[in-house]
Amino acid sequence: MNWPVEHQQPRWPDLGELADVESTLGDLPSLVSPRDCDDLRRRLASVARGEGFLLQGGDCAELFTAPLTEPTENKLRCLADMAAVLTSGSGLPTLTVGRLAGQYAKPRSASTETKDGRTLPVYRGDAVNDVRFDTKSRTPDPLRLLAAYRAADGILSDIRRLRMRNRALFTDLGGSFFTSHEALLLPYETALTKVDPASGQKYGLSGHLLWIGERTRQLDGPHVAFAAAVSNPVAVKIGPTTTRTDIAKLIELIDPRREPGRLTFITRLGANAVHDRLPLLVDEVLAQGSPATWVCDPMHGNTYTTPDGIKTRRFEAIWAEIRGFFEVHRALGTHPGGLHLELTSRDVTECVGSHSPVLERDLHLRYESACDPRLNGAQALELARLVAPLLRPASQGLEVLEDAATRG
């Protein structure tokens, strides 16, 4: 199928080859099971009721090969350490979901990139093209969709082996671990969408939790239509331009029966906009009678470029947006349900600030991300320590928020 380029789809040079790849993907085993997708829906419903907290995190863009790929066990240990801090500091169980085993594609603000006077297609993730800047590397290649499947399958195999030999790790992860990614590449997602014989329902079996991005949440677009058609728990990222009407229509399209655990809204508003924009959106969800889960992505709304041209994020702005997210929900009597973070256990220098500061002049030392900047392991754990007290019962949480605001 000739998928629409205007909806963040690559310009595949050979549509016949793309069709062959889609057919091959459709014949491969599912990466996840409908039963596990349903289990995650039930757990997200508990989060929406205020009985838990979601920690969703991982790479901005996963890579297929070394040297910058991070071992699966290291990724899970980073999330497990954060989850242990959140649970012990708040008393709430932490549900962990990884941005992994599928985060191989990225939406981009421009279709091309220019370096040294040459203009080539922009890097769209390893499932599409290569980060190297030459014509062959940057030409979208449908065979990379098969490589994405194999990479995801390898990670899921790693997780199954780890579950057998490292029970302590999975105890810290809350007993179970789920995968998620942005459902961006429609040929990949639809090829791995299958009907569950037991229920007769369709599931996107490339991952447990699939989300629609800020750039592809058009109400009449193919990504929202895909999300509406599958029975997975699904999420939608919403930025500062989101209106009450957008929220109402998204609810009606994706979760018309108002089923707990079905729909998650991931806010990416920015530290300067969260107090102004979030109350209107939460109020609309309440007015619609939706049991949607609320999650804060404090990364994407706080990105800036240094004078040297390096994309980064400031730890203090990330923390400020999280505080604002909690303040709004506490004021409205709703549950701040989770965090969505781009992070790595590696000692990278991609985000600036924190108590062990990375300065702008340090960014070039270990900037390893293929796309957006990630928190390193120390920064991620520090953030968990800051957030944990905010999750205590509402009255205590308000006191903590007041103290945090005083400290800045």
Image (spheres, rainbow, N blue to C red):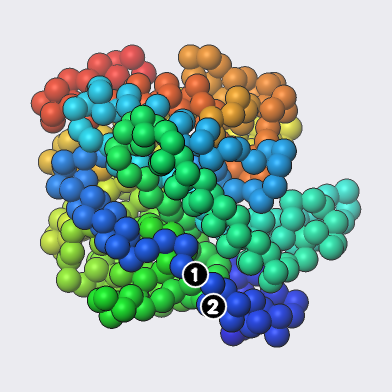
The quadrant of the picture occupied by the C terminus is top left
| 26 vs 405: above or below | below
> In terms of image quadrants, where is residue 105?
bottom right
Q: Residue at x 72, y 60 (%)?
A: 129
Q: In the image as oriented, which residue stretches furthest toward the front?
A: 165
Where 159 sits versus 180, above or below?
Answer: above
Tell me whether circle 1 and circle 2 mark residues in contact (CB < 8 Å). Answer: no
> On the image, numbered disc 1 is attached to which residue?
29
Percent position (x, y) of residue 260?
18, 59
Is the residue marked by circle 2 packed among few (<14), some (14-19), or many (20+) residues within 10 Å?
Answer: few
- Quadrant occupied by the N terminus: bottom right
Q: Kindly identify the residue that appears in the image at 42 percent across and 33 percent down.
A: 166
Residue ID at (14%, 23%): 396
For the question of whether residue 219 can be seen, the reply is no
Q: Amino acid at mark 2?
A: Asp
Residue 384 x/y as whole percent: 37, 26
Left or right of 60: which side holds 211? left
- Secondary structure beneath dot 2 equals helix
Image position of 139 (left or right of 165): right
Q: Amino acid at mark 1?
A: Pro
Residue 179 visible within the image: yes
Image location of residue 309, percent across then percent down? 71, 37
Residue position marked by numbered label 2 in the rendering: 27
Q: Quadrant of residue 147?
A: bottom right
Q: Nearer the viewer, residue 33 or 247?
A: 33
Q: Nearer the viewer, residue 360 or 74?
A: 74
Classify residue 60 by image quadrant: top right
Q: How many marks?
A: 2
Q: Secondary structure at mark 1?
A: loop
Residue closer to the observer: 359 or 306 = 359
Near mark 1 (Cα within 10 A), the count class, few <14, some 14-19 or many ≥20, is few
